[in-house]
Image (cartoon, rainbow, N blue to C red):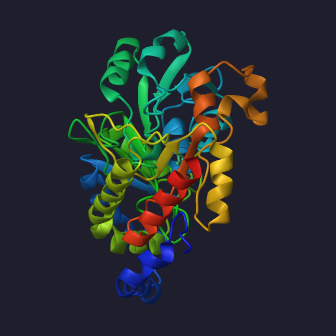
Amino acid sequence: MQVPLLDLKAQYAAIKKEMLAAVNEVLETQRCIGGPKVEQLENQIAKVSDCKFAVGVSSGTDAILSVLMALDIGPGDEVITTPFTFFATAGSIARLGAKPVFVDINPETYNIDPAKIENAITENTKAVIPVHLFGQIADMDPIMEIAKKHNLYVIEDAAQAISSQYKNKKAGSFGIAGCFSFFPSKNLGGIGDGGMVVTNEKTLYEKLLILRNHGMKPKYYHHCIGGNFRLDSIQAAALLAKLPHLDEWSQARRKNAKYYNEKFQNTPVKTPYISDDCLSIFNQYCIRIPNRDKTVECLQKNDIGCAIYYPVPLHLQPCFKYLGWAKGDFQNAEKAANELMAIPIYPELTDEMKVFVADTIIDFLS
Ligand SMILES: *Cc1c(COP(=O)(O)O)cnc(C)c1O
């Protein structure tokens, strides 16, 4: 049996009619940039996130980048984040000439460890970017408290966590801004690149509206140096067609996670730890095993999709060598990079597939 890590064709088959109608509407109107579809999506994502405002942007990366730009973060500034995340989190900080300052993760949740943040704060620290990894929100209460005490912005990298909850509050609603990605493999994935910023701050919202369009308002009058960070109408239309299904998809992922959790009880497999404060959307279901690389090989041989998020923590990436970090500096992140692997968790997995994935892993390890 073949089990891919993610099967977007299965998702498309279930919603093909709505998707084609949505895309067709944009084609017929030829309103390709901005317009009502983008505005509708912004309104709905704001609602999903319990935020007042939302700004559609070209990707999750550009969501983070444009927020940092809007907050005037640049050379001389430091921004604290986790080394165990997708590159874009730290890449956006570095692209603006600011310095990414890494803080190790909690070894259970894989999210930034709030207890280690204060040590990393200097007089140049301007912001903290917690990442809600694999769909579980970081421990926001202590993070917000530290940020308040030291007057720091909190920008949530919620690329993997749209609609996820922490103490009944939604991802993106804790900090000054939340950043979502609509990359096709996220829980709410477009048919190409896309992203969104949510915020409750009107001034930030207004700044982002012009920043995403070259700082321009009205046409050809430029208030600040922005970029082309716009969200395509066709992406907005496709996402509007998918959004009504988001909750049922996240529910199905949680159900699959529960199945695996039970199957892996009393085996060497360490299942994801989800805090009682959190309702995860399981963008990934990552198990932890000592002989990870051999297990990956075994799954590949059996046509079971799996992936390593992330094989090299950011402090050890060649492009960040100039920051001066070395092996051993963030041991929890390094250990996670060596021991974690993601297995199929997507909503359309069949019962037979789940049994096959779990049994293959259990057989291999015993
Ligand atoms: C996907 C992702 C991003 C970047 O999103 P894009 O839409 O691919 O630019 C940023 N941070 C995290 C944690 C992500 O998973």
Q: Quadrant of residue 271?
A: top left
Viewer-closest of 297 and 176: 297
Position above or below: 148 against 7: above
Position above or below: 233 against 254: below
Position above or below: 13 against 357: below
Q: Residue furthest front?
A: 366
Residue found 40% across the figure and 40% down from its top: 266
Image quadrant holding the N terminus, namely: bottom right
- Residue 213: image location, x then y, percent: 53, 55
Is residue 89 visible in the rendered image? The answer is: yes
Is residue 348 visible in the rendered image? The answer is: no
Q: Is residue 155 left or right of residue 330?
A: left
Q: Is residue 357 left or right of residue 241?
A: right
Viewer-closest of 109 and 356: 356
- Residue 47: image location, x then y, percent: 24, 54
Viewer-closest of 327 and 340: 340
Q: Residue furthest left?
A: 168
Q: Total marks drawn? A: 0
- Residue 68: image location, x then y, percent: 52, 36
Q: Is residue 352 left or right of residue 99?
A: left
Residue found 78% across the figure and 25% down from its top: 322
Viewer-closest of 145 and 165: 165
- Residue 196: image location, x then y, percent: 43, 53
Residue found 50% across the figure and 39% down from its top: 268
